[in-house]
Amino acid sequence: MWDSLSVMTIKQLFSSYPYAADFFSSLPNLEQSEESSVGAYFAAIEEDTLQDLGIGRQEFLEQFLSFMLQMEKLKEDKVKIESITIIGGKDKQGKAEDIELTIHAGEIVCIVGPTGSGKSRLLADIEWVAQQDTPTNRKILINGQLPDMRCRFSVEHKLVAQLSQNMNFIMDLSVEEFVSMHAESRMLENIEEVTSHIIAKANELAGEQFNPDTPVTSLSGGQSRALMIADTAYLSSSPIVLIDEIENAGIDRQNALRLLIDKQKIVLMATHDPILALMGDKRIVIKNGGISKVILTSEKERGNLILLTAIDRKMLAIREVLRSGGHIDEIPMALEEII
Ligand SMILES: Nc1ncnc2c1ncn2[C@@H]1O[C@H](COP(=O)(O)OP(=O)(O)OP(=O)(O)O)[C@@H](O)[C@H]1O
C-alpha cells in the first residue's frame, strides 16, 4: 500500500497533520535543530531519498501510522469530557456574575442577548478555558476540575471545534483536496466516500452549489460556512462545538444544527434566531457582558417551534423568489394563513 502513495500525497498528509513536527522529532538521526530536521525530512520525501536519512520509505510510513494511532489514543484517554462548568466572573461594569453553570455532554445550550452584549466573549472564554485571565474574569472547569493546562495551549489536546462568524481560506486547494486531506489525517479508510458525502452535505446547506474542484479560496461566505459545518460534523473529534451565529450565513440553519448535534458532544451556540434558540435544551441570557439568567426550554416553547418553523419555511420561500429575481406578490400562500 505504501509504495502506491505518491510523494505528493505523503507531503499533503504531513502539511495537514498538526503533529507533524512532533512526529519528525521522534525519528532517529536528528542531530540538527527540530525545525531543520523537519525540513530535511520534507526534502527527502520530495526527492524520494529517505534512505539517506537512514530510514526506508515503508518503515517511515509505518512509524508514522503507529505515531498517529498513539496520538489518537492519547487524545481519547485524556479528553473524555463529561461536563464543563462556567464559574461567573464580572460583567462590563465590574458587577459580580453570580453563577455556576454546568453543561453536560449531549446538551445543546444557546446564548442569546443584544448585539455587543458579550455572547462571542462567552464562547471565547470556553474556547480558551479561561482561568480568570480574560476581561470577564470567568473560570472554566472541565469535568468539575481545573483543566490540564496543556488543553489550553496545545493543538494536540484541543477540546473545541469552533465555527466562527468570519471564515476565510488562505490555502491554494480545491474543495475535494481540502476535505480529503482532513479525512486522511483522521485515518479514515473510506476517504473518497467520506469526502464526497461531506461535499454533498455542504451543498445541501449552501444556497448556491459548488463543485469538488472549486478552489476553497473562491467559495462565498455562506459556502465556506456550509463546508466547515459539514467538515466539522463528520471529521472533528473535538468534544465541544462552539457555533457563532449560523443564521447570518445564508445557509439552511436548522439542517446545519441537526448535522452538528452529536449525543456525545457539548454544543454551545450564540444566536439571534428563535428557532435555533428553541432547538436548544436551555439558553443563557447575556446582558451587559454578564450571564443574567439561564432558561430551560419549556414544552410549551417547543410546541411553538412547529408554528415558527412554518413561518420560517414561508420566509425561505419568499427569499428564494427574491434571490431568483421574482416578484414577492407572486407568492401563492399569504403569510396570514400561517399565523
Ligand atoms: N464581562 C465583560 N467584561 C468586559 N468586556 C466584555 C465583557 N463581556 C463582553 N465584553 C466585550 O464586549 C465586546 C462585545 O462583546 P461580544 O463581541 O462578545 O458581543 P456579541 O454579543 O457577540 O455581539 P454580536 O451579537 O454583535 O456578535 C467585546 O469587545 C467583548 O470583549
Image (cartoon, grey):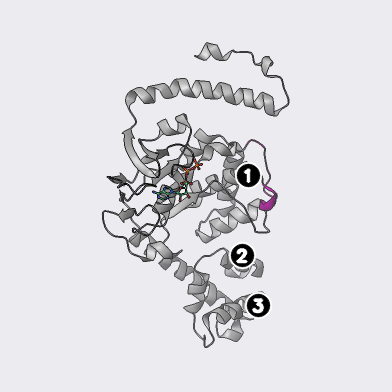
Q: Which residue type does callout 2 highlight?
A: Gln
Q: Position of residue 32 (x, y in %)?
A: 54, 86
Residue at 54% of width from left, 56% of height from top?
Answer: 183
Relative horizontal placement of residue 127, taking residue 250 as reference (left or right):
left
Vertically, is 198 above or below 251? below
* SS of the residue under disc 3: loop
Numbered disc in front, either 2 or 1: 1
**To which residue does mark 2 refer?**
12
Residue at 51% of width from left, 65% of height from top?
Answer: 18
Q: Nearer the viewer, residue 171 or 53?
A: 171
Mark 1–mark 3 Cα distance, whole angstroms, equals 39 Å
Give the extent of the magenta segment: 207-220
Q: Which residue type does callout 3 highlight?
A: Asp
Relative horizontal placement of residue 246, taking residue 305 as reference (left or right):
right
**To which residue does mark 3 refer?**
48
Q: Position of residue 86 (x, y in %)?
A: 32, 49
Q: Assign the N terminus to one quadrant of the image.
A: bottom right
Q: Which of pointers 3 and 2 lies earlier in the amino acid sequence?
A: 2
**To which residue does mark 1 refer?**
221
Numbered disc in front, either 1 or 3: 1
Which image quarter: residue 140? bottom left
Vertically, is 269 above or below 327? below
On whether residue 210 falls in the magenta region, the answer is: yes
Dominant secondary structure (helix, strand or loop) of the stretch shown in magenta: loop
Q: Which residue type does callout 1 highlight?
A: Gly
Q: Is mark 3 within 8 Å of ligand 1?
A: no
Mark 2–mark 1 Cα distance, whole angstroms, equals 25 Å
* SS of the residue under disc 1: helix
